[in-house]
Amino acid sequence: MRRHQRVALTAISALVSVGLVLVLLFAGSATEGPFARVMHTVANLVSRTENRAAMKLRGPGRIEQMKWLEGYRDDREVLVHPDTFLFGVYDDGTPATLDGVLALERAIGKPLALIQTYAAWGDKPEQAFPDRIVDAIHAIGSIPVITWEPWLTDFENSKHPDLPLRADRDRGGLASIAAGRYDFYLDQWARDSKASKHLIMLRLAHEMNDPYRYPWGPQNNQPQDFIAAWRHVVDRFRAAGATNVIWVWSPHVAYAGWEVYWPGDQYVDWVSTGALNYGTVANWSRWWTFDEIFGKHYASLSGLNKPIMIAELGSVSVGGDRAGWYAAALDSMRTKYPAVHAALFFNVRRDNTVTYQAIDWSVLSDSATLRVLRR
């Protein structure tokens, strides 16, 4: 994009954004409810206009490279029965910006088919359906993958007095979802998903069998509650006509017994899991190969007769040969694990979700690993 064109686009976007902020400030508490929805819609229309203008100024290069993906982007049946391999990425700059995604693509010399973002449940504006990033991902020719996390304590009791108090909300939270207590939120997401008119891969309540990390895990819920909640969510979306949503079921296969969380063939389109090698960064970890992390679970996962996604693929550089790890992982997907049809690089620079010290999974400064990915 030429410099003066980029400056002009930025200026227009800034003026519109300032106008929206001023309207919100003067409106005060009136922004609650229907008015907030109107402003959300206006903001998304502005964002879509920005996306279209930016694509015109950048030129058709990436879109032309992604022509081969059009069948997957536009036809649900093709995406749920893939006959090729889809590479993707989660970058921790998303959803605020796609700059990190595009930087990785430039480094490996190829645009990526799947772009992942994370979205939490709740009342905050950023917890509404992410229209803007979904539209932006489609505008550059890729398919969005949304990891949708049911953080039930993010709903305000003042707005939803029928919900349990925050301190009590996680205990049995999935049963509450199944009972319809969060339908006000589900139904809006379903309507917005349908309105987007784009195919969306929705990875709901991932790692539901992990008893440590997430409140929707077995420390607060029973497997049958997860199954009932999953089916309820899918049924609400289907009732709203949101058939453009592809449902991705994602257990943590390192914990035994994940099979009991299976919602049923009619409720799942893809299965996924993560494959992250923590090397020797913590006293509980060691250098694990991709085969050691994933291989022993492949037979069970592939037995579900769904395409498999490695939703978080990554290795640290501490404790072994990272470039060699990626080379072996990608080769084994091709030769040993034919049911794997997608792998998303975990391009996160500061991850402190399971360790006290932040971990850098990004490979942008690792020339040896980048050579592997390019190849």
Image (spheres, rainbow, N blue to C red):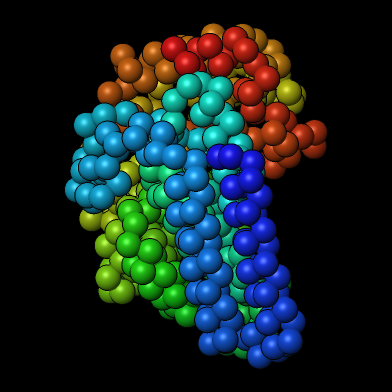
Q: Nearer the viewer, residue 16 or 260?
A: 16
Q: Residue at x 70, y 37 (%)?
A: 351
Q: Determine whether, in the image, residue 241 is placed left or right of residue 125.
A: left
Q: Determine whether, in the image, residue 326 is placed left or right of residue 270.
A: right
| Image quadrant where residue 366 sits | top right
Residue 193's place in the image compared with 100, above or below, is: below
Q: Nearer the viewer, residue 190 or 16?
A: 16
Q: Is residue 220 visible?
A: no
Q: Residue furthest bottom?
A: 30
Q: Is residue 337 visible?
A: yes
Q: Residue at x 42, y 49 (%)?
A: 139
Position of the C terminus, as image quadrant, is top left
Residue 34's place in the image compared with 127, above or below, is: below
Count the numbered circles shown. 0
Residue 371's place in the image compared with 106, above or below, is: above
Q: Residue at x 56, y 29 (%)?
A: 104
- Residue 98: x percent and y percent? 57, 43
Q: Residue furthest front?
A: 4
- Residue 195: x percent and y percent? 36, 69
Residue 165's place in the image compared with 47, above or below, is: below
- Residue 238: x percent and y percent? 28, 68
Q: Determine whether, in the image, residue 316 is placed left or right of residue 289.
A: right
| Image quadrant where residue 272 sits | top left
- Residue 346: x percent and y percent? 56, 33
Q: Residue furthest right?
A: 357
Position of the N terminus, as image quadrant, is top right
Q: Determine whether, in the image, residue 267 is placed left or right of residue 146.
A: left
Q: Residue at x 74, y 82 (%)?
A: 25
